[in-house]
Amino acid sequence: MALTAVGGSFGHQARIIFVCVRRIVHLKSRDTPLGVLSNLIEPMATIAMLTLVFTTVKLRVPMLGDYVMLFLMTGILPISMFRNGAQQSEGAVRQLKRNLVLPQIKPLDLMISGVITSMLTISTLFLFVTILFWLVYNVEWPQNIVFCAIPAVCNGLIGLGFGCINLVIKSWFLYWGTIFGIVTAPIGLLSGMFYTVDRFPQKIQDILYYNPFMHSTELTRTFFYKEYTSEFFDPLYYYGWTFTALAVGLVCERVFRYRLAMDRK
C-alpha cells in the first residue's frame, strides 16, 4: 500500500513536470524563432569558432581522434549543461511564475522542468554531431555514448543546485545574477575545453583538481574515446560536488519556497 502511494505521488509529480516542460517549449517557440534550440546558440557558436581557429590558424592543440570539433564538443557541452542548467532553472521560474498560484506546483517543479529542457536540447546536439561524424566521416563510434550522459546529468544537477541558491540570493540582492555570471565566465577555459589535463605539470594539475568541471570533462572523454582513460578523475570529489550542490540548493528552495513564490523581481 505504501509503495502504491509513493508510486502514485511520483507519477503525479512527473505529470506536473512534463506539463511544465511542454509549457517552456511552447513559450520558447513563441518568443524566439529557434524555440528551445536557442539554448544551443552559445555552445554551437563556441564549438564552431574554436574549430575554425584551430584548423585555420593551425594552432597546436592536444587532442584525441582526428577531428577538432569532436574534441571541442566533449569539452564544451558538459560545461554548457551546468551553465544552461543554472540559467534555465531560474528562467523557468520567471516564465511560469503565474502557475505557482496552483497549490500542486512548487518553484522546484519549474526549476526541474527548466533543467530537463536544457538537458534534452544539449544532449540532442551531442548525439547529432556524433552521428553526423560517424555517418559522413566514418569516425569510430564512441566507446560508451550512454555513459557520456553521466557527467552531463551531474553537471545539470549542479546547475539546478546553483539555480536554487541563486534565486534565493537574488530575492534579496537583485544584482547577484550579474556577479555570478562574471565569476563563472572563465570556467570553461579552466575545465579542459581545448586541452587534456595530463599535458600540464603536476603543480597545475593540483590546482585544476579543485575545479569539479575539469573532472566532468575528463570523464566525458574517457567514455567517448577508446584510446583515452583519465587518471585525473576523482569520483569521490566530483560526485561529492554534485550531491552537495544539489542538497544545498534543495534545502534553500524548501526553506525559502514561500519567498520565491511571492517574489516579483
Image: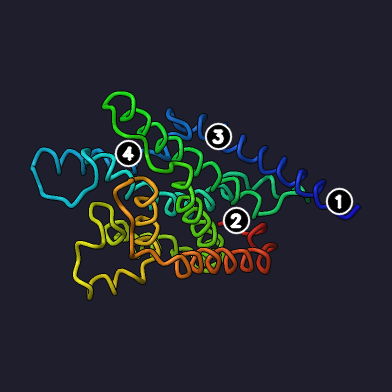
Query: Residue 5's mark?
Result: 1
Residue nearer the viewer, 160 or 24: 160
Q: Is residue 53 left or right of residue 251?
A: left
**Residues under labels 3 and 2: Cα distance?**
23 Å
Q: Quadrant of residue 212?
A: bottom left
Dot 2 amino acid type:
Arg
> Which secondary structure, mark 2?
loop
Q: Which percent across, then down, holds residue 49?
A: 21, 41
Check the picture and name the quadrant holding the C terminus.
bottom right
Mark in front: 1 vs 4: 1
Q: CA distance from mark 4 to mark 3?
A: 19 Å
Dot 4 amino acid type: Met
Task: Determine the residue positioned at 69% across, 45% down.
Answer: 99
Q: CA distance from mark 1 to mark 4?
A: 44 Å
Front: mark 3 or 2 = 3
Question: Disc 3 versus disc 1: distance between alpha carbons?
Answer: 30 Å
The mark that comes first in sequence, 1 or 4, is: 1
> Which residue does the numbered mark 3 point to in the structure image?
25
Disc 4: which residue:
44
Tag 2: Cα neighbours inside 10 Å, few (<14), some, or many (≥20)?
Answer: few
Q: Amino acid at mark 3?
A: Val
Side of 181 where 88 appears, left or right = right
